[in-house]
Image (cartoon, helix red, strand yellow):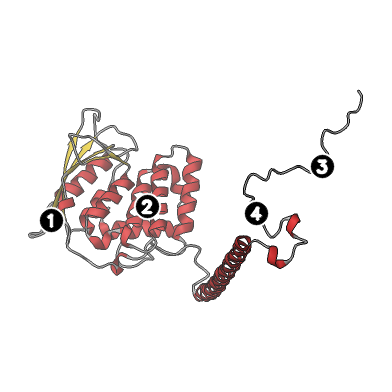
Amino acid sequence: MYHLKPVQTRNDVCAVPTCMYSLKPVCTFSFDRGTDKQSPASVDPLSAEIDNLLKKVENDELSMLAERQQRVLQQLADLKKELLSMRTELKLNNKTSSPSSKSAPVQSNAKLTAEPINLIYLQDFVVNASPKYIPHSLLALKNLWKDRLNLQVECFTHSTVPKLSDEAISFQQAITTNSTTVANLPNIKVTLIWKNVGTYTEMITSPTAYVPICGEVNILRYLSRCGPSEFNYELQENVVEVDSILDACYLMINKQDMKQRQQILRTLGAKLGKTVGFGGGGEVVSLCDIAFTSAIKQVKHTVTKDINPNMAKCIARVTTVVGI
């Protein structure tokens, strides 16, 4: 390759024609290199005005940002004070609470107010139960609600059950013999059908739709919502604790493995503690006491040796009060 001389250099002067009117450059800014060495009088006024406007906007944005940051810091400081006060209050409450109890006992039903029963939610239903797993909770609710609600039970035997056990016959006599109703009280008619359904006791509220509620514990949940308000466990403060006890009772009935039943029974024993009832041992029997007693009676042949004396007291108390 060989070098060529430049066609045009920087120092070349271009001849500007004089036949046209000459104007000053309109795009000259104050920060252009060509204007750095010029006098202040030669700076474009429009450029200076734009620079001033930009500086003013920048200063306003900075001040607004600083003010916003100050407000955020103040809010964080107030939140920190509130959290510190809450922590102090929680520490005081923990000190005043009894440290001996591992879990808070279920609130007694006696603390709940008795309200009129909503008749809209009362409807007749059918219960399919196995004679081997008797739903003792129906008899308990019948005796427990006798001053608030008439629970009328009528029993039938399905073709899948050739013969009733002695325990089922005694239960049937107890729940149908005491059929006296109190005047001016709401009524619920229950049709109990002895059927080979295993541990999954069924409750059918709509025969046309046939959407069963499976499990005796879930039947108790349903009846507690539509029955007397003072027995509705969902109005209590520790509803989560009650649900955990009811779920444990459900699992104890439906788990066929003996070791799993024993483990669930130990869990319920820990929740019961030294009291004679899950409701604290008050005068009123709680829903958890009924579910626990019914579950023990259904699987007693597998967990009899694992029942501690305090559990036996709870079962005896429920049996005496509600007659199951």
At numbered mark 4, what does the secondary structure look like: helix, strand or loop?
loop
**Above or below: residue 286 compared with residue 174:** below
Residue 113 is situated, as x and y percent measured from the top left of the image, at: 25, 68
Disc 1 on helix, strand or loop? loop
Q: Which mark is residue 132?
A: none
Tell me, for residue 24, which label it has, or none: 4
Amino acid at dot 1: Pro
x, y percentage for residue 257? 47, 38
Q: Which residue is mark 3?
A: 12
Question: Local crowd at mark 4 within 10 Å, few (<14), some, or many (≥20)?
Answer: few
Q: Residue at x 38, y 56 (%)?
A: 242
* Marking on residue 292: 2
Q: Amino acid at mark 2?
A: Phe
Label placed on residue 186:
1
Distance from label 4 to label 3 (Cα)? 21 Å
Specify the amino acid type for callout 3.
Asp
**Front position among marks 1 and 4:** 4
- Of the numbered discs 1 and 2, the one sitting upstream in the chain is 1
Relative to 136, say whether 42 is above or below: below
